[in-house]
Amino acid sequence: MDLKSKINLEKLPRHIAVIMDGNGRWAKEQGMARVFGHRNGVKAVRETTEACTELGVEYLTLYAFSTENWKRPESEVNALMTLLVETIKNEINTLNENGVRLRAIGDISRLPEKSRNTLLQAMENTSGNTRMTLVLALNYSAKWEIVEAARKLALATKSGEIEATAIDEDAFANALSTSGIPDPELLIRTSGENRISNFLLWQIAYAELYFTPTLWPDFRREHLYQAIIDFQNRERRFGKTSEQLL
Ligand code: FPP
């Protein structure tokens, strides 16, 4: 039996988030520069997006560039920004053909103008698509996002727009950059690192975590299917006992 047919389509996670890791190590293994790993990572992005769309996953969030990634050598940062522009331009027709809407989370005001404009145009161009939403986390970190949300709510309270007593979990979630997007139910991290690295800290409160040693450029649809099957075999209790779930 192939892996895909083992997936219960009635119990799919609505939202899958991925920390794409291991591009640099993959390139090193081949004796190549780190950028070669990022370029090959795009194949994994394409295959994961296609597989999620075909299955019926509603949201896929990819951690493409963190606020900490600016600390990398300038040449690598520039290469990543160029790759982003190229990939979006190359994939825009495929996204539209497949009904995929592009969104971004993170402080995109700090991206180079060309990258930001390409991204904004692509988001506008795909805004009518409803089959799946592909969320790119760009210049994103969870701590930045939480502080921004707190600031937004503080200002809204100060101006009298909302009462301090009205700040509850829903109000806080709505002030985050993921407002309107359901929380991820499955978080995948590749490359054998067992960390969250400042990604979606609020939103993954109840997510199932799946760590795989596969390096991101090697990640293919079968790896995704395996992660979903693993997710479907877990008991999600949300604080209840096993007996209460029966
Ligand atoms: C982590 O590997 C990967 C990144 C920081 C960038 C991910 C970018 C891509 C896959 C390419 C473009 C993506 C899109 C959405 C167009 P690493 O460099 O940290 O690897 P290492 O831990 O082995 O050094």
Image (tube, grey):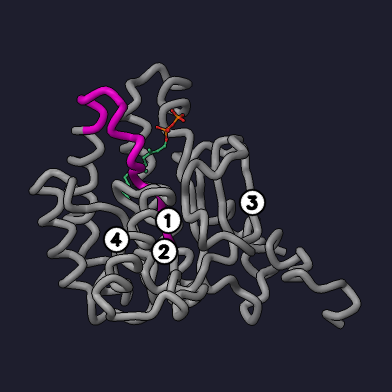
Q: Is 59 or 172 nearer to us in this picture?
A: 172
Q: Is mark 2 within 8 Å of ligand 1?
A: no
Query: Which disc number belongs to residue 104?
Result: 4
Structural distance between the alpha carbons of marks 2 and 3: 20 Å
Structural distance between the alpha carbons of marks 3 and 4: 23 Å
Q: Quadrant of ligand 1?
A: top left
Residue bounds of the magenta highlight:
61-77
Which quadrant, please, contains the C terminus?
bottom right
Structural distance between the alpha carbons of marks 4 and 2: 18 Å
Q: Nearer the viewer, mark 3 or mark 4?
A: 4
Name the residue that disc number 3 marks: 210
Q: Amino acid at mark 3?
A: Tyr
Q: Amino acid at mark 4?
A: Ala
Query: Which disc number belongs to residue 47?
Result: 1
Residue 210 within the magenta-colored segment of the rendering: no
- Return the residue found at the far top: 31
| Disc 1 + disc 2, Cβ < 8 Å | yes
